[in-house]
Amino acid sequence: MKLSVEDLGKQYGEDTWGIRDISLELDVGIHGLLGPNGAGKSTLMGILSTVIKPTTGTAYWNGTDIIESPEVVRSVLGYLPQEFGAYPDLTLEEFLEYVAALRGLDKETASARIGEMITLTNLRDVRDRKIKTFSGGMRQRVGIAQALLNDPDLLIVDEPTVGLDPEERVRLRSALANTATDRIVLLSTHIVPDVEATANKLAVLENGQLVTHETVDHFIQRVSERVYECLVPRSDVPQLREQYQVCSTVQRSDGVKVRLIAETRPIETAEQVPATLEDAYLDTVDHPAEV
C-alpha cells in the first residue's frame, strides 16, 4: 500500500495558500503530522480524504489518481475529523450498526467488526448506553471505532486527543497503535508527545509547506547532544529565553528548572540530557504550537 502526494497545493485567495508544493510518500505504519496552528494540516488531510479539491498537484493511491477517481480511496478510507459528531440518542451499538449500514457492510460482517471495535476501544461496558451520556474521551474512542469499522487500508485522524485527560489520551493512543500494523495511518496533532508515543515517521508542516518527512529517530538526532537542563534563579529565565530555544520551564522552591537547546553548555551547572521529539520540533519550527 502506498499513498503518494505530488506538488499538492490549495489556494484560498489571491495571495493565500493553505498548503503549497507538498510532495511525500506514505507507506504502512503511523505517520505523525505536526505543525503550528494554521500550518495546513487540516487542509492536507481534507484533500487526502477527498473532501477538498486541490488547486495544484495530485495524490495517488497505489498508482491511481484520487482527485480524478476519489472512489478508489473512499472505499478503503477511515476518517476521524477534529469535530466528530454522533447521534446522541443512539446507544453505542446502535450508532455503529448505523455506520456499518452506511458503509455497506453485510449483517454478519458488521456484527463481527462492531464487537472487535468495541473491544479495541475499551467500550464493552457501555455498548448499550446512549452516546449522550459519554465523556469526551469516550466519544473520541467512539470516533476511532467508527473510523476503523470498515477495516480501512488508510486511516486519517485529525487531532484525536485534544481536550482529553491523560488517561484517555493514553487509551486512545494505544487503540491507534494497535491498528497500524497493516494499514497507513496519518495522525495530525499539535500535541508532540502523542506523535512520539505512536508514530514511525514524522511530517512537519509550517506556513503551508513541508519542512521534513523522516523517521522519528532521525528527526530527534537533529538536536542530539544539544539539549541541556539547568536550575537557575527566576530572574535569569528571561535572559536564557533571549539567548536560547527554551523547551520547558518547571517552577521549583529553589528556582526554575530550564530545559533548552544550545550549541555548547549554556552555563557551568547545565547538564546535557537525552533529546526528545518535542525538543527537535521546537528547534525546527519558527512559531511552534502549544506542547
Image (spheres, rainbow, N blue to C red):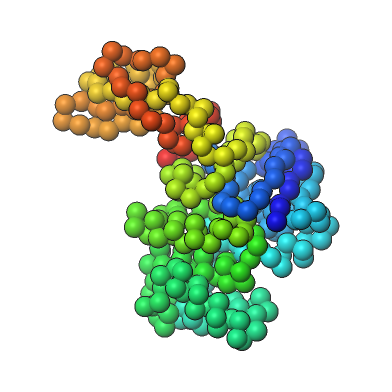
Q: Residue at x 76, y 55 (%)?
A: 62
Residue 94 locus on image (x, y percent): 51, 83
Q: Residue 279, located in which quarter of the rendered image?
A: top left
Q: Quadrant of the C terminus?
A: top left
Quarter of the N terminus within the rendering? bottom right
Q: Position of residue 82 (x, y in %)?
A: 54, 57
Give the tally of numbered discs.
Answer: 0
Horizontal and vertical percent for residue 288? 49, 34
- Residue ID at (73%, 46%): 5
For the point 40% across and 60% down, the residue is: 171
Residue at 20% x, 25% y is 255
Q: Image height check: is 56 above or below 184? A: above
Outermost residue on the left side: it is 253
Q: Residue furthest right?
A: 68
Q: Is residue 151 above or below residue 171?
A: below
Q: Which of the 4 image quarters holds residue 208?
A: top right
Is 155 on the left-hand or right-hand side of 279?
A: right
Give percent across and percent down for residue 13: 73, 41
Looking at the image, the residue that sits furthest to the bottom is 107
Position of residue 249 in the picture relative to residue 88 (left or right): left
Relative vertical location of residue 116 with respect to residue 111 in this rendering, above or below: above
Asked whether the viewer can see residue 232, the reply is: yes
Up/down of 187 relative to 259, above or below: below
Q: Is residue 88 visible?
A: no
Q: Could you say which is closer to the camera, residue 63 or residue 126?
A: 63
Depth order, front residue of 93/238? 93
Seen from the viewer's position, the closer of residues 74 and 236 is 74
Q: Quadrant of residue 69?
A: bottom right
